Image (tube, rainbow, N blue to C red):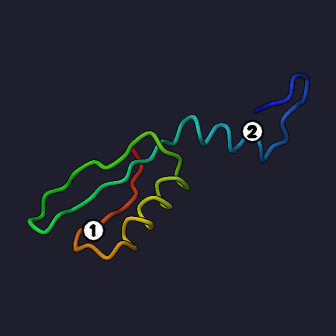
Amino acid sequence: MEERGKIPNREERSQEIEDATSRWAVWRQDDNGGTFLVASGLTEAEARSRAEALEATGHKQTYWAARG
């Protein structure tokens, strides 16, 4: 959260813009080729982290992060 009266630096502002404009989702593909939305409205880092965690469970399904 931004402190009142504090001017964000370039890096902080860039992250705010990315967070606001670049929403990511996590998808799953099952054994039959069907694709399903697992989660949406995430930052890229959140989506990639969640997809990696799901992949690590060892199930046959494939998980990935994608913009949108």
Q: Which residue is drawn at 21% across and 62% down?
A: 29
To which quarter of the image does residue 18 belong?
Answer: top right
Q: In which quarter of the image is the C terminus?
A: top left
In the figure, is residue 33 to the left or right of 28? Answer: left
Residue lying furthest front in this view?
57
In the figure, is residue 49 to the left or right of 3? Answer: left
Residue type marked 1: Thr
Q: Nearer the viewer, residue 22 or 34?
A: 34
Which residue is identified by label 1? 62
Residue lying furthest left in this view?
32
In the figure, is residue 29 to the left or right of 58? Answer: left
Task: Tell me where residue 32 appears, x and y as whole percent.
Answer: 8, 65
Residue type marked 2: Arg
* Sequence-wise first label, 2 or 1: 2
To which quarter of the image does residue 6 belong?
Answer: top right
Task: Tell me where residue 19 appears, x and y as whole percent.
Answer: 59, 40
Please, is residue 57 above or below residue 1 in the view? below
Q: Which of 49 and 5 is in front in this view?
A: 49
Which residue is identified by label 2? 13
| Circle 1: element type | strand
Label 2 – label 1 distance at C-alpha = 34 Å
Q: Nearer the viewer, residue 10 or 63?
A: 63
Task: Tell me where residue 45 appears, x and y as whole percent.
Answer: 55, 56
Task: Tell me where residue 22 appears, x and y as whole percent.
Answer: 51, 42
Please, is residue 24 above or below residue 57 in the view? above
Residue lying furthest top in this view?
4
Q: Quadrant of the N terminus?
A: top right
Q: Residue at x 81, y 43 (%)?
A: 10
